[in-house]
Amino acid sequence: MENFLILVAEDEKSLRELILRALSFNGFQVASAADGREAVQKVKDLTPDLVILDVGMPIMNGYEACQLIKSDPNTQNVPIIFLSARGKVDDIQYGLDLGADEYLVKPFNLSQLGGQVIKVLQKYGKV
């Protein structure tokens, strides 16, 4: 797993650090962003294997960041997993319609997130 770079975009510092530690513990390389605009820039700069995007971030929310990532020919194939406290069917469907591969509703457990990361990487033939 050490060959895979996961970008975690989450504005809540304690949750972001928890996710980063869990992914690192499972052998992934990790990078982080605290808002959507920073996430979009880091996707362009780092070309991660997968992005975990919080929906409710400042400056640019996760939905907007996803739209920019998916509309750029250089980054459109980067897999995205949304994290959100918004768990209504319409919210989930909207995220998936924007191009996300998975949508996890907070609170979630870290093993669930790890399983989704592996599932999405497998979907793209990376694992």
Image (cartoon, rainbow, N blue to C red):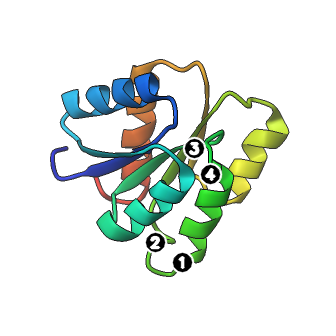
Q: Nearer the viewer, residue 43 or 103?
A: 43
Name the amino acid, label 3.
Answer: Glu
Res. 99 visible in picture: no
Residue that badge 4 annotates: 59
Q: Earlier in the sequence, mark 1 or mark 3?
A: 1
Residue that badge 1 annotates: 72
Label 4 and label 3: CA atoms lie apart by 23 Å
x, y percent for residue 101: 56, 51
Label 1 and label 4: CA atoms lie apart by 19 Å
Residue that badge 3 annotates: 102
- Give me the residue at 44% from left, 79% from top: 74
- Give me the residue at 32% from left, 33% from top: 20
Q: Earlier in the sequence, mark 1 or mark 4?
A: 4
Q: Earlier in the sequence, mark 4 or mark 2?
A: 4
| Label 2–label 3 contact, CB within 8 A | no
Q: Residues within 10 Å of mark 1 (few under 14, many from 20)?
A: few
- Give me the residue at 54% from left, 77% from top: 72
Label 2 and label 1: CA atoms lie apart by 5 Å
Name the amino acid, label 4.
Answer: Ile
x, y percent for residue 34: 46, 43
x, y percent for residue 26: 22, 30
Res. 13 visible in picture: yes
Label 2 and label 3: CA atoms lie apart by 17 Å
Residue that badge 2 annotates: 75
- Give me the residue at 78% from left, 41% from top: 91
Which SS class for mark 2? loop
